[in-house]
Structure formats: structure tokens, C-alpha cells
């Protein structure tokens, strides 16, 4: 299947995540929850500023970075007082997402069920 990714949609992100997570026993419903959770941060953008993430959110983003779905970037901005401010961003790796979707094999990665359970149990406690 040839995939052209200009915008990372729910279907595209789900397709990539399912290749990664289904082998670890996650079902469609759980993968759709994670897909919606991730897209909830990005909205209609391809990037987001790291400082909006909680430590739990950041753990998930680092995991997705290991899987090749996301990457981090930094940029420096000059402030009015002459100081520089470093901004850390998360962006989708569209080419890697395309490669994951087009691959015939399910990617074998570490078990994410514990991370998933931790994320949603701590969100419910809040």
C-alpha cells in the first residue's frame, strides 16, 4: 500500500501504531485510545512544544520516539532582553510512519501495556 503523508490523520497514526502495538497484545480499542490521546496534543499541527507535557505524557512520547513515530527538535529564540530561550518540540516522523505502515512485518518492540496502564490509571486518579 503506497502512503502519501502530508497530514498525520487518525487513520494513518492508528495504522502505524497497530503495526507496533498489536504484536504486544494490545487490541484495536486500546490502540485507538492511544491514537486519540497522541493526536489530542497535536491538533491540526505537526509539532508541539514539549513544556505542555506531564512526565507521564513525556514517557509515552519518548517511547514513540524509540519506535520512530516522533522525534524531538530544539530551537533557540532571542528574547527582548538579549537572552536566548531554548524551545524543545516534538514532531511526527512522516517518512518513518510511512515506512512502518508499508512494511509487511509487525515491529517487535518492548511491552507497552504497563506504560498504557500507568498512563490511564494515573489520569483517572487525577
Image: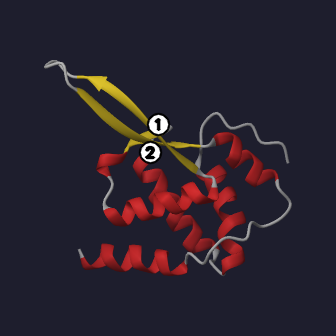
Image vertical order of residue 76 relative to residue 105, above or below: above
Query: Is label 1 in contact with label 2 (beta carbons under 8 Å)?
Result: yes
Residue 9 rendering spot, x and y as whole percentages: 59, 46
**Mark sitting on residue 20:** none
Q: Is residue 124 left or right of residue 79?
A: right
Alpha-carbon neighbours of circle 1 within 10 Å: few (<14), some, or many (≥20)? few
Pick the quarter of the image with the C terminus. bottom left
Considering every residue shown, the one lying at the far left of the view is 81
Label 2 crowd (10 A; few <14 / some 14-19 / many >=20): some
Decide: is 74 above or below 62. Answer: above
Residue ID at (54%, 46%): 71
Q: Residue 93: x percent and y percent? A: 61, 43
Q: Is residue 86 left or right of residue 103?
A: left
Residue, x 77% and y 42% (percent of image)? Answer: 3
- The residue labelled by disc 2 is 42
Residue of label 1: 45
Identify the residue at image location x=33%, y=63%: 55
x%, y% of residue 47? Answer: 46, 39
| Mark 1 residue element | loop
Using the image, determine if residue 77 lies above or below residue 60: above
What whole-number distance in Å separates the C-alpha atoms at marks 1 and 2? 5 Å
Q: Quadrant of residue 29?
A: bottom right
Please name the residue shown 40% across and 78% down the image: 118
Amino acid at each position: 500500500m503506497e502512503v502519501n503523508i502530508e497530514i498525520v490523520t487518525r487513520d494513518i497514526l492508528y495504522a502505524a501504531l497497530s503495526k507496533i502495538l498489536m504484536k504486544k497484545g494490545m487490541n484495536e480499542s486500546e490502540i485507538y485510545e492511544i491514537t486519540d490521546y497522541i493526536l489530542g496534543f497535536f491538533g491540526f499541527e505537526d509539532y508541539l512544544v514539549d513544556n505542555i507535557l506531564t512526565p507521564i505524557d513525556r514517557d509515552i512520547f519518548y517511547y514513540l520516539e524509540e519506535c520512530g513515530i516522533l522525534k524531538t527538535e530544539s530551537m533557540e529564540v532571542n528574547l527582548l532582553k538579549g537572552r536566548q530561550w531554548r524551545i524543545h518540540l516534538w514532531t511526527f516522523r512522516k517518512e518513518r510512519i510511512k515506512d512502518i505502515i508499508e512494511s509487511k512485518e509487525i515491529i517487535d518492540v518492548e511491552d507497552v501495556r504497563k506504560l498504557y496502564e500507568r498512563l490511564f490509571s494515573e489520569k483517572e486518579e487525577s
